[in-house]
Image: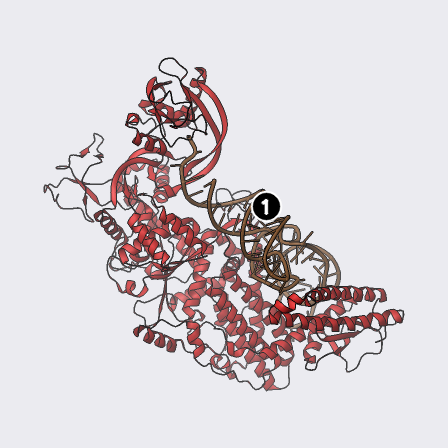
Chain colours: A red, B brown
RNA sequence: GGGCGGUUGGCUCAGGGGUAGAGCGCUUCCUUGACACGGAAGAGGUCACAGGUUCAAAUCCUGUACCGCCCACCA
């Protein structure tokens, strides 16, 4: 006996219960030793400090939808979750927490701080993983990893975020050091002094990819640098006047005749009274600004390059320090913030009459993508990774299509980037992260010394010792006064190793053997370079092959008016709010229905205050239409299910098991055995759909099968086929809408309605047949829908009779195409019923008899299922044309005459018929112009011509019928005899 | 400066060589034992603009405009 479904679907009650059931049955764990073919994904690890936002919700809806179908299709599905230690973000959070205690990281010292940060991530981090469970994600939580985790042998959960013990034989932290040492030994890592992107707020270097350029309107200041001989010299144009204090020269284009006489001479740098040379360099664009560029090698990458070509511009003069404050080299401006210095410098120059002019100017200013602070280009000695070898092999991998991108256009984006790859600055001046495993010998390395402040001064030519562990002694002098490099690695260096380190690299684990390479990487386009490209490079180097076979790039979630969702701007929604309002299923289904391959998704929101964006921190989400629609869908499905279950009338026990009623897509295991045998033979693994089709389904034999039954079975077969087809193309939106319309428009609106009278039949066999079909279609629908709406489908499924006890829907087989259910004749017949029914309803509505039962005469081809029409249109079908006045319509090959018995407004009926005739005439004209065109008949596809002819015949028929009706009306002056 | 997307009914979006679809909103009607988070019937669009290819273009090509995104050292 199935438990009766509650009156209304209550996501808040159902979701935790069902998720608990899945966990209890261990549905999401993927053992390495499993004969079934593997399907694996590693999720893009969210920041350990992060909380679920709409982008995550979309991303993981896509993940779980794909995973659940694969699981139901019989794969050994692994989705490996985890979090990223997120160096900068986490360090910022922890420092924030410390500030509240009146402490800074310096008070704790490095060891104390990292300990504190680790505690912090254990305590507060990883809440996002719990939030993913609320979304329903079917990930293997027992394998949860963290990009800075240490090896844990055995034992209880290490922390809430871990949701399980560390699984493999190596800690992530150690593996990262291994990888770096390998890089070093390959000669790809070097130390170099260059202009880097310095964040004065975070006090660290960041890579080019972490700099976000924003166009700001500013000014172009033209400054006069007088000649040393008192002549007028020249004017330079700059967007950063404060850096002039560090100028070491001026550059002009060699062919710029205005300045040829000055090249090789000196000009006087105002305010600091320094003589600086004028040089000729091709980099300078004579048509921009004044044609003369001030050269500040310490604060501008271009200027640094120019200075490399002109030794007289060296050495550089640093006038801005790590905090964005002017250095003693800035003379009277020392100690001022860079913004203040700018104002004072401009004012001083103006006072001296050296400010030639100020133009409005728009230019791109680099901001740190984590904190938004304006990046300060500074000259620094940093660790760089030369990626050209890696990029070349990654390019080869992509070009050989060992990694493919969906949508395809992203392939080009990725290869373009790889082709022009530049050295990657991998060192960061942080404490939270993987400390660079390079050691310096204070005894024998002359380039290394302790400063008075106790820190390490490391010269450019220092000779570090690479080692994962602290070396016991210096291999050169056997001294044991070794110091580790103070910097940590870019977080992206560790995440580049994610797909294989999470599976145990550098050990050779069973997990790697089974699940690497992974099948899919599902990610946003914003990290295609930062992460995806680097994983391909790292995978190729460390594993000898690509880390994933496919990259699925999904859209960005935007607000309704196209702005990026942002917490601080109040333009974002918390997905948990959506789950609270509408349930996880509706949230997922709403999101999946929005997936297309275009670039972004606009999300409509209405807040309690009435606006499109939150008016304040307390403003709550009132409505999200796109999700609400799917909540309504869930309610619909729930009610269909209630209807089916409440009509079993206690006969559940006598119903045959579902597997007999409806093909259950054959035994999955048989399939796997076949596939593994193929694998052993070295054969290409057959497409599962093909295998599925090759296995004969148990025939669907119910003697009392009626037209409606044959129709709905044919339709669910078609729906399954098209959902599968769309999912194979990652057209998740299309798949969602197909499911939506099948359930609502076909199953609920027509089949359930047509089933009602038969359920009330006196014949038990008739009743039984309908119940069985209802149940079979419902059960198949639930399997089809499960990846989209896992909670509600599982909850209903658990209440169905005829299933095996103890099973979960999550591990049932996924419906295939069901081509054997296709029934052309049934579809055509029922379509006729639907069309005629609609025409009658329309007529009833027009004559104001929508709610009444009417008499109707239908002329046309035989075989129309009149009982269905009578039921659906609420009418009585007459054997003969009615005597009295009628209202008429023509649909397809059928003519419909509705006895109006004086109901009809003559003028209105004439107007209606005239309007309909006009429409027919218009359509006919269009068709005729085509058919009369010899070119069309001669050149168009034969079936296009045939179709047009058929349409024309039908329209001619309709025109005749309608014309006759109209004539009858006008001739009798309104009596309208039939 | 390059590159990529988008421009379809009031709104948010599907679709994609044969004459336009959905949801919401709107109009009219209906509380019928699955469902008013529902049912029935409607109104509403020269598919941004201009050329071209084709028997046929909203759909393919080229160009233009506007919106968005990515990349790029023009001070």
Q: Position of residue A184 (x, y in %)?
A: 23, 47
Q: What is the quadrant of residue A154 in the picture?
A: bottom left
Residue sitting nearer the eye, A15 or A439:
A439
Quick check: A427 above or below A307? below
Quick check: A524 above or below A245? below
Q: Which residue is farthest top? A: A230
Q: Position of residue A883 (x, y in %)?
A: 84, 78
Quick check: A103 above or below A741? above
- What residue did someone put label 1 on? A611
Q: Position of residue A412 (x, y in %)?
A: 42, 52
Relative horizontal placement of residue A900, taking residue A434 as reference (left or right)? right
Relative horizontal placement of residue A745, taking residue A957 as reference (left or right)? left
Q: Which residue is farthest left? A: A478
Residue sitting nearer the eye, A430 or A459:
A459
Secondary structure, mark 1, is loop
Relative horizontal placement of residue A627, taking residue A35 as reference (left or right)? right
User: Can see residue A600?
Assistant: no
Q: Chain of mark 1?
A: A
Q: What is the quadrant of residue A772 in the picture?
A: bottom right
Residue sitting nearer the eye, A54 or B72:
B72
Residue sitting nearer the eye, A187 or A663:
A187
Q: Quadrant of the C terminus of chain A?
A: bottom right
């Amino acid at each position: 006996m199935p438990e009766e479904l509650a009156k209304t679907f209550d996501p808040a009650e159902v979701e935790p219960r069902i998720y608990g059931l899945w966990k209890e049955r261990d549905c999401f764990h993927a053992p390495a030793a499993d004969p079934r073919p593997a399907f694996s994904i590693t999720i893009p690890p969210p920041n350990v400090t992060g909380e679920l936002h709409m982008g995550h919700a979309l991303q993981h809806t896509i993940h779980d939808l794909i995973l659940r179908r694969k699981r139901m299709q019989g794969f050994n599905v692994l989705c490996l979750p985890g979090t990223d230690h997120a160096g900068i973000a986490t360090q910022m959070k922890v420092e924030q927490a410390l500030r509240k205690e009146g402490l800074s990281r310096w008070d704790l010292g490095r060891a104390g701080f990292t300990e504190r940060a680790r505690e912090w991530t254990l305590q507060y981090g990883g809440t996002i993983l719990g939030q993913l469970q609320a979304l329903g994600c079917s990930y293997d939580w027992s394998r949860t990893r963290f990009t800075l985790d240490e090896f844990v042998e055995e034992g209880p959960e290490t922390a809430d975020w871990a949701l399980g013990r560390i699984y493999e034989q190596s800690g992530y932290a150690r593996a990262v050091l291994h990888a770096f040492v390998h890089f070093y030994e390959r000669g790809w890592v070097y130390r170099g002094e260059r202009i880097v992107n310095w964040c004065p707020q975070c006090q660290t270097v960041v890579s080019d990819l972490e700099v976000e350029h924003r166009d700001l309107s500013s000014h172009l200041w033209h400054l006069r640098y007088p000649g040393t001989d008192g002549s007028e010299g020249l004017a330079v144009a700059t967007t950063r006047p404060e850096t002039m204090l560090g100028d070491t020269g001026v550059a002009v284009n060699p062919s710029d005749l205005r300045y040829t006489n000055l090249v090789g001479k000196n000009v006087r740098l105002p305010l600091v009274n320094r003589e600086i040379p004028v040089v000729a360099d091709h980099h300078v664009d004579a048509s921009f600004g004044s044609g003369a560029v001030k050269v500040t090698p310490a604060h501008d990458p271009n200027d640094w390059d120019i200075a490399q070509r002109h030794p007289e511009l060296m050495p550089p003069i640093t006038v801005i320090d790590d905090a964005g404050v002017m250095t003693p080299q800035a003379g009277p401006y020392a100690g001022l913030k860079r913004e203040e210095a700018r104002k004072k410098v401009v004012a001083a120059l103006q006072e001296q009459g050296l400010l030639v002019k100020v133009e409005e100017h728009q230019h791109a200013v680099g901001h740190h993508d984590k904190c938004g602070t304006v990046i300060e280009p500074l000259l620094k000695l940093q660790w760089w990774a030369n990626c050209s070898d890696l990029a070349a092999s990654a390019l080869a991998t992509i070009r050989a299509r060992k990694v493919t991108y969906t949508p395809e256009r992203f392939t080009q984006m990725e290869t373009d980037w790889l082709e022009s790859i530049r050295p990657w600055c991998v060192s960061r001046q942080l404490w939270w992260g993987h400390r660079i495993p390079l050691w310096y010998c204070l005894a024998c390395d002359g380039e290394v010394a302790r400063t008075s402040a106790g820190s390490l001064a490391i010269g450019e030519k220092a000779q570090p010792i690479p080692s994962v562990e602290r070396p016991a002694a210096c291999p050169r002098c056997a001294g044991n006064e070794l110091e580790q490099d103070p910097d940590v690695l870019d977080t992206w260096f560790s995440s580049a190793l994610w797909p294989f380190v999470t599976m145990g690299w550098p050990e050779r684990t069973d997990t790697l053997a089974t699940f690497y390479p992974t099948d899919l990487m599902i990610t946003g386009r914003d990290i295609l370079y930062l992460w995806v490209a680097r994983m391909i490079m790292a995978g190729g180097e460390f594993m000898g092959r690509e880390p994933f076979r496919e990259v699925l790039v999904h859209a960005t979630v935007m607000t309704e008016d196209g702005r990026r969702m942002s917490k601080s701007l109040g333009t974002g929604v918390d997905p948990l709010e959506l789950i609270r309002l509408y349930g996880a299923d509706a949230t997922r289904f709403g999101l999946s229905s929005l997936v297309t391959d275009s670039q972004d998704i606009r999300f409509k929101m209405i807040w309690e205050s009435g606006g499109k964006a939150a008016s304040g921190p307390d403003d709550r989400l009132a409505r999200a239409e796109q999700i609400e629609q799917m909540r309504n869908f869930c309610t619909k499905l729930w009610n269909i299910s209630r209807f089916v279950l409440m009509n079993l009338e206690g006969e559940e026990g006598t119903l045959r098991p579902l597997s007999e009623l409806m093909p259950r897509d054959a035994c999955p295991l048989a399939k796997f055995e076949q596939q593994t045998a193929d694998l052993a033979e070295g054969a290409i693994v057959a497409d599962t759909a093909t295998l599925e089709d090759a296995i004969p389904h148990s025939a669907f034999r119910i003697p009392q099968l009626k037209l409606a039954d044959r129709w709905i079975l044919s339709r669910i077969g078609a729906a399954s086929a098209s959902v599968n087809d769309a999912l194979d193309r990652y057209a998740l939106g299309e798949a969602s809408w197909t499911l939506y319309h099948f359930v609502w428009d076909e199953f609920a609106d027509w089949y359930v309605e047509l089933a009602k009278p038969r359920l009330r039949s006196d014949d038990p066999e008739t009743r039984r047949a309908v119940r069985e079909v209802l149940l079979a279609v419902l059960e198949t629908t639930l399997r089809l829908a499960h990846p989209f709406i896992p909670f509600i489908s599982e909850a209903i499924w658990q209440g169905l009779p005829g299933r095996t006890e103890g099973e979960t829907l999550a591990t049932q087989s996924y419906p295939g195409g069901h081509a054997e259910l296709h029934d052309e004749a049934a579809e055509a017949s029922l379509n006729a019923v639907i069309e005629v029914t609609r025409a009658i309803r329309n007529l009833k509505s027009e004559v104001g008899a929508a709610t009444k039962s009417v008499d109707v005469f239908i002329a046309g081809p035989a075989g129309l299922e009149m009982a269905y029409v009578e039921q659906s249109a609420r009418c009585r079908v007459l054997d003969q044309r009615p005597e009295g006045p009628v209202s008429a319509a023509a649909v397809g090959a059928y003519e419909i005459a509705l006895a109006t018995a004086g109901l009809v407004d003559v003028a209105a009926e004439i107007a209606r018929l005239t309007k309909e005739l006009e429409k027919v005439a218009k359509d006919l004209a269009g068709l005729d112009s085509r058919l009369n065109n010899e070119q069309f008949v001669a050149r168009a596809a034969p079936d296009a011509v045939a179709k047009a002819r058929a349409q024309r015949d039908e329209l001619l028929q309709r025109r005749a019928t309608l014309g006759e009706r109209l004539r009858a009306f006008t001739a009798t002056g309104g009596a309208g005899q039939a």
